Image (spheres, rainbow, N blue to C red):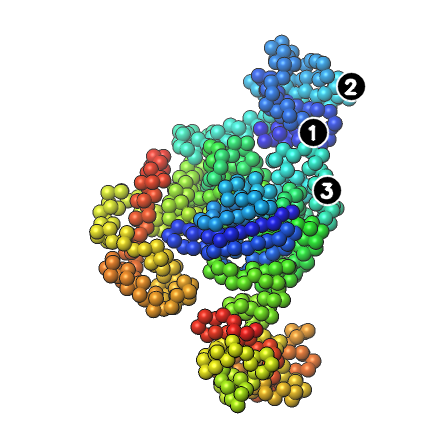
């Protein structure tokens, strides 16, 4: 549909006559007069019911588009003079090509969506891809863009599609109205390229549509079938990233670290672990200020001077707070082993809280083999 | 055009990390204000909170006297320009600028009028039919600005828009954006980590560190009267020289000492109650590099503020020369006139501090005592 809309927009720039395309139900699917979009045209319905391929009705002239069998679309132009008829002849050829392309594009999108969601039989992917001109064996990566708000008008897909217009290397697949996947073909010298692409997508969506997005990035896939794995990883990156680093808008699967490990732990195991590390709910006894101090202490790689500088507190105050943590939890955070245990346990705690509250457990499809 | 007001805004990320603390700022209508600070200081987060792309934890944000805390970003009537601008490669400059308006279903005639007007303002009318690959870096940046201008927003938010450009182009675009502000006559909030950009572009500058506002002032006030050592060191290139010293009173004169050098503080400026409270206490003396001179005339003219040092490096930059020197463990930098300097590498020399341009800071709080 993208190509058809673009073609009609281009026609609108060249001609003063109103030009449009209706589908086989008489619905206006593209028109230079955008107020007519989505409306059912009575003249079109009558023409389709009659089975005619050409007709002059009222102000407009109609012609069936030269598409392939099975695709019934009609083009109309305002006017019935010879010049308008000449234009209509040219337009039916040109727009017919666009509709045919759209048909291919639509089938390609469906195939890619089914591949990503593992709804396609593995044995058929290669042959279907070949029929649609998609190279099966290529190094690709899935970049999942999750929108904070629904993209009901398809504007976000349009922005991303226009940022990466090369249909040989980049495929933009809309999974639903909040999730869009860019399947990007990697080149040998692509180091740093993926991050640039992710940042560009985020910033362009913010610029054009003032939309906040989160982006998950999977690992490279080496054939089309393998893209499903890369997609799952990108989705997992967003899920886990949302739990442990909500301030980051771009999350890499390969950089999930401890979060990925914790995400796979069962809630029962998590609870047992927490009871062992923080007996008698000792973690709950730590106040907000102390927890913030610990967070900054970890962020400063256990460097006391740097931590007190960043917190604007005297070093003795920091020592006092760390002693307090030790007294309550029994863990001396200046000691590396204790610090690791505290960090891990606090992540487990956060995971449990979120899982019980916001998440409600990982979606089933994430756990598919 | 609109004013922007932030009242006690906080942003706390997961894990209790506070990115922005108690941020209060009033941006006047048509003002060009700069948020500057080192990376991680919360300036971009603040900008994104104004845009609505980041939720605020606490506080209130007003745009044109309207509370926008719960207003969707797209309904705030603002436009953002980012560092990582990307133009649509297969579209012409015209289409690139018009694209956002088409998405908003703006009438075609209106789009044409807005794009043409923006192109005129940016002086890129002759480029409207070109594709991005046929543009230079500066031209692309103008198109990126054009995409924001065509939206005719109340407020422009710019997040390090020049960071991806090379040094020469950055200087050029700096001037362009300043001119653009004058032409558009609108409110701009601009984020940068580059203090030179901040000093040259803004009517007011907000210096941030670790999520806190350090000082909000005009460029000249920031430079001449920094409120603490962070602002003093961050603003100015080369940075201000800091010397740990002690103030003492000798026969009624206030003096500071570093190594064997003694500097007498001019009584008319420094003999105040605030400074006298620090007698026999440790302070930090701040001296701008241009307040240090090595010409014989200057040295002879004010013998009470002269010190000795060994010249380590002399950097001739054309219009100015930097002299790097050490004295008994103290390192200092002077910015001197290349035509008049007598400093030679490896040789001892006498330098004079402009006594009236010494800043004193509390060594514990790092706040200014006098500047």
Residue A207, quarter of picture: top right
Q: Which residue is found at the position 58% from the left and 17% from the top?
A: A24
Residue that numbered label 1 is attached to? A11
Q: Which residue is found at the position 51% from the left and 60% from the top?
A: B213
Q: Secondary structure at mark 2?
A: helix
Please state the total of marks drawn on the protein image. Answer: 3
Cα–Cα span, label 3 and label 2: 35 Å
Q: Which mark is residue A130?
A: none
Q: Secondary structure at mark 3?
A: helix
Give the vertical position of A293 relative to B360 (above or below). Answer: above
Residue A221 image position (x, y, % from top left): 43, 42
Same subunit under labels 2 and 1? yes
Q: Which residue is found at the position 49% from the left and 53% from the top?
A: B8
Cα–Cα span, label 3 and label 1: 21 Å
**Disc 2 chain ID:** A
Residue that numbered label 2 is attached to? A82
The tag earlier along the polypeptide, 2 or 1, is 1
Q: Nearer the viewer, residue A45 or B297?
A: B297
Relative placement, left or right, of B330 versus A271 is right
Check if mark 3's residue and mark 2's residue have beta carbons within 8 Å: no
Q: Which mark is residue B116?
A: 3
Residue A313 image position (x, y, % from top left): 39, 66
Give the vertical position of B297 relative to A360 (above or below). Answer: below
10 Å crowding of disc 1: few (<14), some (14-19), many (20+): some
Q: Nearer the viewer, mark 3 or mark 1?
A: 3
10 Å crowding of disc 3: few (<14), some (14-19), many (20+): many
Cα–Cα span, label 2 and label 1: 18 Å
Relative placement, left or right, of B121 versus A256 is right
């Amino acid at each position: 549909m993208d190509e058809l809309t673009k073609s009609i927009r281009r026609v609108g720039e060249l001609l003063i006559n109103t030009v449009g395309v209706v589908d086989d139900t008489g619905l206006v699917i593209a028109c230079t007069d955008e107020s007519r979009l989505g409306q059912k045209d009575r003249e079109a319905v009558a023409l389709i019911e009659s089975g005619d391929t050409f007709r002059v009705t009222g102000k407009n002239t109609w012609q069936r588009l030269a598409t392939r069998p099975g695709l019934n679309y009609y083009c109309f132009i305002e006017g019935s003079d010879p010049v308008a008829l000449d234009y209509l002849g040219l337009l039916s050829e040109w727009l017919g090509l666009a509709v045919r392309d759209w048909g291919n594009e639509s089938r390609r999108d469906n195939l890619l969506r089914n591949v990503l969601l593992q709804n396609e039989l593995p044995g058929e992917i290669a042959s279907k891809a070949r029929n649609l001109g998609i190279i099966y064996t290529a190094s690709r990566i899935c970049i999942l863009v999750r929108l904070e708000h629904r993209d009901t008008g398809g504007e976000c897909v349009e922005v991303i599609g226009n940022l990466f217009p090369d249909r040989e290397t980049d495929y933009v697949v809309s999974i639903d109205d909040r999730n869009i996947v860019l399947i990007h073909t990697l080149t040998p010298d692509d180091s740093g390229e993926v991050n640039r692409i992710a940042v560009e997508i985020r910033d362009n969506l913010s610029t054009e549509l003032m939309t906040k997005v989160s982006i998950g990035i999977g690992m490279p896939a080496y054939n089309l079938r393998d893209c499903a794995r890369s997609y799952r990883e990108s989705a997992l990156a967003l899920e886990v990233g949302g739990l442990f680093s909500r301030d980051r808008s771009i999350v890499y699967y390969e950089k999930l670290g401890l979060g990925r490990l914790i995400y796979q732990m069962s809630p029962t195991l998590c609870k047992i672990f927490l009871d062992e590390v923080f007996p008698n709910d000792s973690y709950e006894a730590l106040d907000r200020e102390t927890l913030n101090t610990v967070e900054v202490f970890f962020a400063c790689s256990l460097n006391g001077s740097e931590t007190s500088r960043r917190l604007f507190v005297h070093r003795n105050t920091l020592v006092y707070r760390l002693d307090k943590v030790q007294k309550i939890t029994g863990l001396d955070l200046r000691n590396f082993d204790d610090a690791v245990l505290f960090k891990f346990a606090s992540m487990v705690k956060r995971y449990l809280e979120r899982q019980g509250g916001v998440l409600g457990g990982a979606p089933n499809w994430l756990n598919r083999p | 055009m609109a004013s922007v007001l932030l009242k006690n805004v906080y942003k706390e990320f997961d894990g209790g990390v506070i990115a922005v603390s108690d941020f209060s700022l009033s941006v006047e209508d048509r003002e060009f204000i700069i948020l500057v600070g080192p990376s991680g200081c919360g300036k971009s987060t603040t900008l994104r909170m104004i845009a609505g792309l980041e939720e605020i934890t606490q506080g209130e944000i007003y745009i044109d006297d309207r509370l926008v805390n719960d207003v969707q970003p797209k309904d705030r009537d603002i436009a953002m320009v980012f560092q990582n601008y990307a133009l649509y490669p297969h579209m012409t400059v015209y289409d690139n600028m018009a694209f956002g308006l088409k998405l908003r279903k703006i009438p075609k005639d209106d789009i044409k009028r807005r794009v043409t007007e923006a192109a005129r303002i940016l002086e890129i009318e002759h480029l409207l039919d070109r594709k991005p690959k046929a543009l230079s870096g500066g031209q692309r940046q103008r198109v990126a600005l054009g995409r924001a201008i065509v939206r005719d927003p109340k407020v422009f938010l710019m997040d390090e828009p020049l960071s991806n450009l090379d040094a020469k182009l950055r200087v050029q675009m700096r001037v362009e954006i300043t001119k653009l502000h004058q032409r558009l006559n609108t409110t701009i909030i601009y984020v940068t980590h580059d203090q030179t950009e901040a000093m040259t572009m803004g009517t007011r500058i907000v210096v941030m560190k670790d999520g806190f506002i350090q000082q909000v002032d005009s460029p000249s006030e920031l430079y001449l009267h920094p409120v603490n050592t962070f602002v003093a060191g961050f603003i100015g290139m080369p940075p201000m020289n800091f010397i740990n010293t002690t103030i003492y009173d000798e026969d009624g004169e206030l003096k500071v000492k570093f190594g064997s050098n003694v500097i007498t503080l001019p009584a008319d400026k420094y003999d105040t109650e605030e400074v006298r409270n620090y007698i026999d206490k440790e302070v930090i003396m701040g001296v701008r590099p241009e307040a240090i001179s090595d010409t014989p005339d200057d040295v002879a003219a004010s013998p009470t503020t002269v010190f000795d040092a060994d010249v380590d490096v002399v950097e001739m930059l054309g219009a100015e020369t930097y002299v790097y020197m050490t004295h008994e463990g103290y390192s200092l930098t002077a910015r001197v006139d290349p035509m008049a300097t007598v400093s030679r590498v490896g040789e001892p020399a006498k330098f004079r501090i402009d006594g009236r341009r010494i800043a004193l800071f509390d060594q514990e709080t790092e706040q200014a005592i006098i500047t």
